[in-house]
Structure formats: C-alpha cells, structure tokens
Image: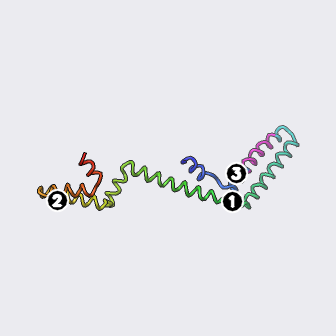
Amino acid sequence: MMLCFVLLLGCASTPEQIATDSQDIRTLAESSRSRFVGHDDPEGVAEQTAIIEKAGAISVAAAAVDPTQPAWQGTLELALWTALLLTLAVVVWQTGLGTLLRRLFNLIPERKRSAAKLLREAVEHPTQIREAAAAIRTADPEINAAWKH
C-alpha cells in the first residue's frame, strides 16, 4: 500500500512528462545530428533536423494540454492519505509514544483517575483498603475477573 502511495504522489503530470520526453528526444537528435555532420551525411542531418523541429513543436503543444484527474484518482489519493494517517497512529500508539502523549496532555480517563484517588486514600488510611478494592473491582470487569481467578 505504501508503494502505491509513493507512486501516486511521485507521478509527474502529463504535460510535464510530455515536455520532458520531448526535450530528451531533442537532446538525442541534436547529438545524432552532430555525428551525421561529422560523417558528412546530409540525409541524416535533414532527418535529425526534422526530429528536432517535431520535438520543439511537441514541447509547445504540451503547454496547451489540460491535465485532468479522473474521479477515482482523487478517491484513491484520499484513501491512501487516510491509510497513512491510520498507520502512523497505530505506530505511535504501539511504540509507547501514545502513553507519553496521554501523560503530556493529561488525557487520563476518568475511571483511571477515580481508581488512583481510591488507591491514594487507601494508602493514607489503611482502614479503607477494602472499599478501594471493591470500588476498583466494580469499575473494571477485567480486574474483577482476574480477582476471582
């Protein structure tokens, strides 16, 4: 999927590609023409001159080409950007950066804050340890299941 993303973003527009290719053809034809001149071959020189002129005309015509994007390409690009962002989010979360970001921005869920408060009170007042354990078990079904086993 990432390869498709890179290829989609790395593609040049059609007019730019046409202009680049015609410039490459012109460069090759000029090189060939100079070799034909060196070999004293007027037919080869005339042929390469014609190719150079055609390549110039193509470059001029390429400027008039209106690059249009098919509807599916925009949808595909949006889907690939979405996949990239989701992948980035998963990587950030799985590497532990998500926990760091939650702590940095104080995004601790209310249940966790409540449990921490109960535990802090239980440490300060050991007589409330049963109430703290019961409250935490009721608030979190997984802890309750682990408690029973």
Which residue is at the front of the view, 10 or 98? 98
Which stretch is magenta? 22-35
Q: Which residue is mark 1?
A: 67
Q: Nearer the viewer, mark 1 or mark 3?
A: 1
Question: Closer to the N terminus: mark 1 or mark 2?
Answer: 1
For the view shown, which residue lies furthest in the front direction?
148
The secondary element bearing badge 1 is classed as loop
Label 1 – label 2 distance at C-alpha = 68 Å
Is 3 situated left or right of 106 in this image? right
The secondary element bearing badge 2 is classed as helix
For the view shown, which residue lies furthest in the top direction?
39
Residue appearing at x 39%, y 51% in the figure:
93
Which residue type carries mark 2?
A: Glu
Q: Which residue is mark 2?
A: 121
Question: Closer to the N terminus: mark 1 or mark 3?
Answer: 3
Is 57 situated left or right of 20 in this image? right
Viewport quadrant of the C terminus: top left
How crowded pointer 3 is (Cα within 10 Å; few <14, some 14-19, many 20+) is rated as some
> What secondary structure is the magenta-colored segment mainly?
helix
Asked whether disc 1 touches disc 3, contact meaning CB atoms under 8 Å apart, the reply is no
- Find residue 20 and name its label: 3
The answer to which image quadrant residue 76 occupies is bottom right
Which residue is at the front of the view, 102 or 66? 102
